[in-house]
Image (tube, rainbow, N blue to C red):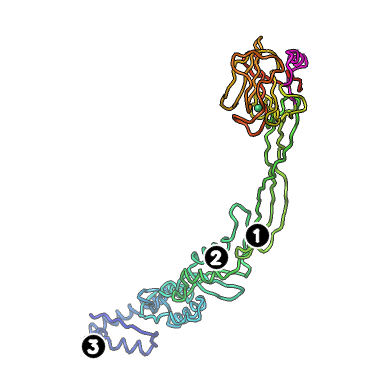
Amino acid sequence: MKEVTVIFKHFPDKETIIEILSYNNFFKRVFGFIKNNKILMRISSLCLIGMMAVGVSIVSVGITLGLKVNYAGAFIATVKNSGVFDDAKDIAVDHIESSNADKVIETPKFSMTLTVSDRLDSAVKVADAIIENTSDITEASALIVNGEYLLCAQTADLENQLESRRTGFEIEGAENASEFTDDIKVENGYYLKSEISDSEEITAAVNRLDVKTVSVITTDSEIPFTKKTVKTSEQLIGYSKVTTAGQNGITRKTESVESVNGTEISRTELSSEVVKEPVQQVTTVGTAISTASAAQRSAERSAGFICPLKRGSFVVTSYYGDGRNHKGIDLGASAGTSIYAVANGTVTYAGYDGDYGYSVVVDHGNGLKTRYAHARALCVSRGQTVSQGDVVAYVGSTGYSTGNHLHFEVIVNGARVNPVSYIGLD
Ligand SMILES: [Zn+2]
């Protein structure tokens, strides 16, 4: 027996079916054979009755003729008639966000089949199957700007690009709030693949959208510390020491900065507070020309020294200790001014001595010595005995010196001490 498969574009009407059936060789032969055989006639009558009974029971359980729908190479549904497919197509077209939707829906192939009535598919279900099986239909999203369709694209791609654009002008470390100045909507649905925009097209469209960003930024700025000087008579002139280190303070300012596409359009100060007060730097400087006690100064004066330069012929240009570990006293005077031995003694050095230049050292006994330095010329020689008031040299600027002056030292048991009290300058 040859199986007959008839493929219809549309569901055939009743006459066509009867015609098709009557042309079927099998039925022709069976009917012919039965006609020519009486016994068979009877048997077939019984069979026919049986078959009718079966037919009645078939109808009663709901067996019916239907159409298998082959859509785009796949069996997608069984429908009652081709009208169901047409309805499904209309539903599908309504679901697709494109004016060209009807053009991408393919023509189905129908084939007749027996089925149970409650297995017939509804138009809504067929519409879903059409959408699923149409190669040019995809789930995607449309970008709607101020109510107007701009493009459709893969949802994730579109959403990612919109998010990058929206947050792209935020300031790192600030509290930011960003929004598009236009009304932006992303509408999910079915779209035609052929109408989907690629990444570059999305970028071009998204980059035309204006973004307003409000950033609350906090900035710290330094408050420079101030300085003050405190004088102390506890220390010698020239003493200078930072006794309290200065520290810059900090002002914290909070501002709201509004920008459009990264261009600042306004800035409002929200608050400003000093979070750290500056610490004033204190420098302590010495004012004393001698730190010795009154008793000690008196004892020093009692050494009986006279001043090595005549009173009124000099000015003190630098005291003992003065900033640079100065171990003597500098008496500024004109070149050639006479320098006197401050007490009787013996010259233990007279010559040129490095930084001292031309200098004289006189030993007064009892561990006391005096030095006279930077002289222009010397008047004594080593081993010579001098009396208080004898001229030992003349003021000059030899050795490590920047001007005419006498550098005078008092040396007690080898240590250079403050000369001021010895020569009455305290
Ligand atoms: Zn000096």
Residue 64 in percent (x, y) is at 40, 78
Residue 271 visible in the picture: yes
Residue 214 tag number: 1
N-terminal-most mark, 3 or 1: 3
Between 198 and 309, the one nearer to me in the picture = 309
Inter-mark Cα distance, 2 to 1: 18 Å
Residue 162 tag number: 2
Inter-mark Cα distance, 2 to 3: 77 Å
Amino acid bearing label 2: Leu
Residue 401: which quarter of the image? top right
Residue 103 left/right relative to 185: left
Seen in the picture, residue 388 relative to 328 is either above or below; the reply is: above
Q: Nearer the viewer, mark 2 or mark 1?
A: 1
Residue 115: which quarter of the image? bottom left
Residue extending farthest to the front is: 379
Amino acid bearing label 1: Val
For label 2, the SS is: helix
Seen in the picture, residue 404 relative to 130 is either above or below; the reply is: above
Residue 53 visible in the picture: no
N-terminal-most mark, 2 or 1: 2
Query: Which residue range is magenta in the image?
Result: 288-307
The crowding category of the residue bearing disc 1, from other C-alpha atoms within 10 Å (few below 14, some 14 to 19, many at least 20), is: many
Residue at 66 percent of width and 14 percent of height: 386
Q: Which residue is mark 3?
A: 32
For label 1, the SS is: strand
